[in-house]
Amino acid sequence: MKILLVNPNTTATMTETAADAARRVAAVGTEIVPATSSMGPVSIEGYYDEAFAVPGLLMEIAKGEKAGADAAIIACFDDTGLDAARALANIPVIGICEAALASVSFIAQRITIVTTMERSRLPLEHLVHRYGMSGRVKVRAADIPVLSLEDPQSNARDRLRNEIATALREDKAEAIVLGCAGMADLTRTLAEEFDVPVVDGVAAAVKQAEGLISLGLTTTKRGAYATPISKPYLGLLQGFEPKTLKAG
Amino acid sequence: MKILLVNPNTTATMTETAADAARRVAAVGTEIVPATSSMGPVSIEGYYDEAFAVPGLLMEIAKGEKAGADAAIIACFDDTGLDAARALANIPVIGICEAALASVSFIAQRITIVTTMERSRLPLEHLVHRYGMSGRVKVRAADIPVLSLEDPQSNARDRLRNEIATALREDKAEAIVLGCAGMADLTRTLAEEFDVPVVDGVAAAVKQAEGLISLGLTTTKRGAYATPISKPYLGLLQGFEPKTLKAG
Amino acid sequence: MKILLVNPNTTATMTETAADAARRVAAVGTEIVPATSSMGPVSIEGYYDEAFAVPGLLMEIAKGEKAGADAAIIACFDDTGLDAARALANIPVIGICEAALASVSFIAQRITIVTTMERSRLPLEHLVHRYGMSGRVKVRAADIPVLSLEDPQSNARDRLRNEIATALREDKAEAIVLGCAGMADLTRTLAEEFDVPVVDGVAAAVKQAEGLISLGLTTTKRGAYATPISKPYLGLLQGFEPKTLKAG
Amino acid sequence: MKILLVNPNTTATMTETAADAARRVAAVGTEIVPATSSMGPVSIEGYYDEAFAVPGLLMEIAKGEKAGADAAIIACFDDTGLDAARALANIPVIGICEAALASVSFIAQRITIVTTMERSRLPLEHLVHRYGMSGRVKVRAADIPVLSLEDPQSNARDRLRNEIATALREDKAEAIVLGCAGMADLTRTLAEEFDVPVVDGVAAAVKQAEGLISLGLTTTKRGAYATPISKPYLGLLQGFEPKTLKAG
Amino acid sequence: MKILLVNPNTTATMTETAADAARRVAAVGTEIVPATSSMGPVSIEGYYDEAFAVPGLLMEIAKGEKAGADAAIIACFDDTGLDAARALANIPVIGICEAALASVSFIAQRITIVTTMERSRLPLEHLVHRYGMSGRVKVRAADIPVLSLEDPQSNARDRLRNEIATALREDKAEAIVLGCAGMADLTRTLAEEFDVPVVDGVAAAVKQAEGLISLGLTTTKRGAYATPISKPYLGLLQGFEPKTLKAG
Amino acid sequence: MKILLVNPNTTATMTETAADAARRVAAVGTEIVPATSSMGPVSIEGYYDEAFAVPGLLMEIAKGEKAGADAAIIACFDDTGLDAARALANIPVIGICEAALASVSFIAQRITIVTTMERSRLPLEHLVHRYGMSGRVKVRAADIPVLSLEDPQSNARDRLRNEIATALREDKAEAIVLGCAGMADLTRTLAEEFDVPVVDGVAAAVKQAEGLISLGLTTTKRGAYATPISKPYLGLLQGFEPKTLKAG
């Protein structure tokens, strides 16, 4: 199995952190194929960055599918461009927020997501609502910039720990979901430290992807995920239209 | 008052239809400033087209705000890129779907939106849910391509009429919302023909925009609409980052 | 355009405060026609007062429509008698709570309403729920009697300020809605003081009314807003039945 | 026990039908005290009639409580004036729609209410939503005027039967609720004819009233049901303010 | 009337507490027939205990119905086995949580349930959701083992009082529901002490049972409550199948 | 990895069908350990059968965990006894309905479950609601007894096909979920025949189980899934209490 792991943030080191997390849990025989988007912001923090990250992300998904990927993972916790990617692709496409929530739903009832910045909190609450888990899931922001997670000098990890402690005490959280692909390497440490299940979205998405491939399930082409209609594109994005992407 | 009317479809004739609808209802002293996105698909039909339409749309909103617009309208019924545009802009940004629903909510309880294609139906149902009106609003697709609305030879208008008749009979709709900017010129005709209030989103958005400007209200800069953080952009989209867009 | 502004509280000074707020935002060419109900309690604080305010309110709406009003505003934040007024009238009828929520929904996601008394909080929460905004809107009571807002000696305004400060801090409110027609004159002051959008329902309702009139939209006469059936009325309310009201 | 049964329709024959239904199920030792409102429309069909029925209803509840009633029932299926009545009274006040739904919820999961006119359907759907039963309850209108139920020449009863048959077949209803106080005498006949539980709101309300009295439970005076504040009333309704009503 | 009161906890003293509470409110002519399940855990604290309590409970309901009971009450606040019991029985079956919520809904809008242990809180929140009252009802755990309520040495009652005080202050609760059959004897004392309506589920269930019997309503046999199909049972539970239970 | 597959129906041939479906999708290195409950009904059709199936199911889960299983699957589509099993076990426990819904949610938005009998439809609708997917998932019953699926003479498979065709046409279903463990062998045939993704819960559960094991996630022991308190059990079920089950 080949699983494409697209980082819609255009920062290659972040892709490596996610790819490491993916490889740690991948089954024997699963190849993780990492890809960093070549177009858009270096980090995705809120609605605006997300909007500009989508075209580059879709280009990587189209390339990856043509190159033989069996499933694709979008390695950003706001599930950037998920619906558009599903319309584009025949292979399954998996967001890491939805994968984390799907997996954690089997082992706990009350869950807290700890994410990076306050401006990402509302978009995540909308995702939680969309995935039907508003009654079970709270979202907390540790107030840390995304890229600071890679900086050993920052106090980002301390803030993350504080927020987890608060979630256990005040939300009576029964499990924690890490709300950023850049936190993946902390999963096991935090689980042991707080004696609570901790779920990383990248790892969860790898297992969901392997599962769907194994079940022979692909994205439906009925309804809103029907293959996009071929049509002209103008401006910088000329040449992006699906026919080109898929045939090229 | 200057109201920017951005068409995220890159088809200029469609912009003119919308601008005409806007000017018909604009107050004395309101200037409608139409803009056609120069980047992306010629028509937006579903999630995939929408994703590629957003960067060009945001560029027009940034340019329009710099040029002195007091409010911006996104003239596509799936409220393309609305949240990103609000994070970018200080002026109010209004989607035509949300404007139509806000206006119609004062005059009727049960409403049916008649849109173009089946693949647009689910995205609109998600908008209706987001705007808190799932209990009151149904969405029907007349199965007509967006651009066929401009083609006098097509049977698009007949199909639209059939779907409205069905909505009145089966949904017991008390008002009709036209679910595509390209239907704006039919509003009055259909209202008279079916003896029911018919709402066009472009016209509704103009009145909401005038209202907000007159009230001195601008987009909050707290929470998820906080001004985007300045950061590097890579690839074709290099040069799009907000500082450039706003200072440029 | 003539916009009827009915105060269902039978206190004329309160009508003047609301009419001033209305005139400040009215477009050139809009005439605000204030009316004070002549029947019922001097102030509306909770369900009981509201019930007795409705007949007098409806009488003013019937008179105003006959006198040529193009739209009517009910100037009490619990949207007193809104559905009955819509069944009675052909012109659009607008509640100031629903108008404030419709307008603020374009500029912020998380909103707090600050109202007067605890006993008004639950009725407002029901309105918020009805208008589909439970997920976005909190209601706080500053514990101040309605009429104290007109008394310069009272500490009502300090309490209002305290509650707004709490809303920004604890609710992470991105915008504030003033939950009483009697607070209208404070809108701009509070917006500057707290650097947050502040919305007054009377002003918002004027713009919604102008918008609907300009769009040529009137109350649907299908469904629950169908014209009431003419029938005998007994007791003190004899002579109130709709035929009389509308023909007289 | 004395249970006040107030008919907010000002038609005394309808009160008798309801009182008969009440007496048929009342326990030994329960006295049913019927009262017909002396002010307002002869029948309540929709929001407008409802609004004018409330003051007369509240007057009867105040009089009844003073005269020693232990609980009050509002004998109109749209639960007219329920919240205002609860603020006014210390004794429990019961709506016949809420009573019917509370009782039927113990014996069936999917329920259909069959009411009179289409214009009453939306108000009932709002009640169902308020009572938390939207997922279980459908509302159907048999398209019969309220007063026609008392006319042996009308085909009202046939229409009612047709609508019940449709509810069983299409809604897979497991129990039927009669959505009008005037249908009470048909309960047993219809239950036998269709072999399905049929619930009449008046009878259900009598049992809920007896239950609350026996449990020693009275309306809370905290929150929105706190005793109304004494204040001046103007116009025809002068003299209605609660102090007068309760002390007089 | 004969009302069967089944305690699914296999502790007879707890049955007596509940039967006393039932008899205190039973009407003249109502016979309370207590039964203690002879199979399963001595107390029900959470999902696991609940699962093992159901077969014994169903056996008592089958025996009771055959012996002539007119209605059955399940005297455990998590409404153990309610749906299965309704499928089995023709007589009405009433859970004490649903009965308490149905009764309290007539006298207050905001309600807090105070239950025993944290592990019972989530199951009760699920019941509240199922009964459509999530928007009105909070659940608090006083952190007391079920059987400690019978131990005069324990501080269980103090903890219960503390939690009620917190509910009134923080939840602005307008009424309190006691979330355990073993608290029934405290109802009146607590109501007086805190000057707030306090509802005990056992007492409420008795009145709901009397009401349904008096209305001639029995469990629907359509849909999911249809009589179970007769089929072989294996293992220890051999002989439990419904035909045996009902004919035996 | 060892995955325990417990059939709570006491019919061994049904266990074999499910085990075959499980083995077809199991990863290399995954051992499927089937177990048939030895106590309870031969097939589970509705609430009543479900209640009697739980103790035997829990016994198998306790035995399986002690024998070294890494995860457990409950192979009945109504997710029988799921919460109790999670409180009992430390290993992850997976229901086949929730697994099917979790997996299908990645590839389609509108889904229809086709189950066996009408009496199972409401319990499944409750599960769908609990899993947060009411807005996306419909449930249809093909009106076929569970055991008829194993009978080549019955017309069960034709009825299943008819119901799938209706779901595609009327519900606009984008994917189909088979709502009974006994349908597992039909998955691929139906997917090809109708050209739509078809999901079998047993297969989906195997992949979810493998995923959770690989991620090192086990059932939380906080909140309602805390380990049951050891306590005496009476009657036939004596000896079932968790200490015995887990230590034995």
Image (cartoon, coloured by chain):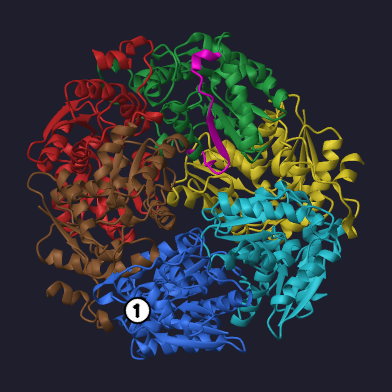
Chain colours: A green, B red, C brown, D blue, E cyan, F yellow
Measured as percent of width and height from the top left, residue A84 is found at 40, 28
The secondary structure type at the circle numbered 1 is: helix
Circle 1 residue: D56
Q: Amino acid at mark 1?
A: Gly
Residues shaded magenta: A130-149
In reply to whether residue A136 is colored magenta, the answer given is yes
Q: Nearer the viewer, residue A177 or F3?
A: A177
Measured as percent of width and height from the top left, residue D160 is found at 41, 78
Measured as percent of width and height from the top left, residue C238 is found at 23, 82
Q: Quadrant of the N terminus of chain B?
A: top left
Residue C54: quadrant of the picture = bottom left
Q: Nearer the viewer, residue B202 or D213?
A: D213
The chain that hosts pointer 1 is: D
Q: Is residue C219 visible?
A: no
In reply to whether residue B145 is colored magenta, the answer given is no
User: Would residue A80 appear left or right of F227 to someone viewing this image?
Assistant: left
Q: Residues within 10 Å of mark 1 (few under 14, many from 20)?
A: many
User: Would residue C144 appear left or right of C81 to someone viewing this image?
Assistant: right
Residue F67 in the image: above or below residue D148: above
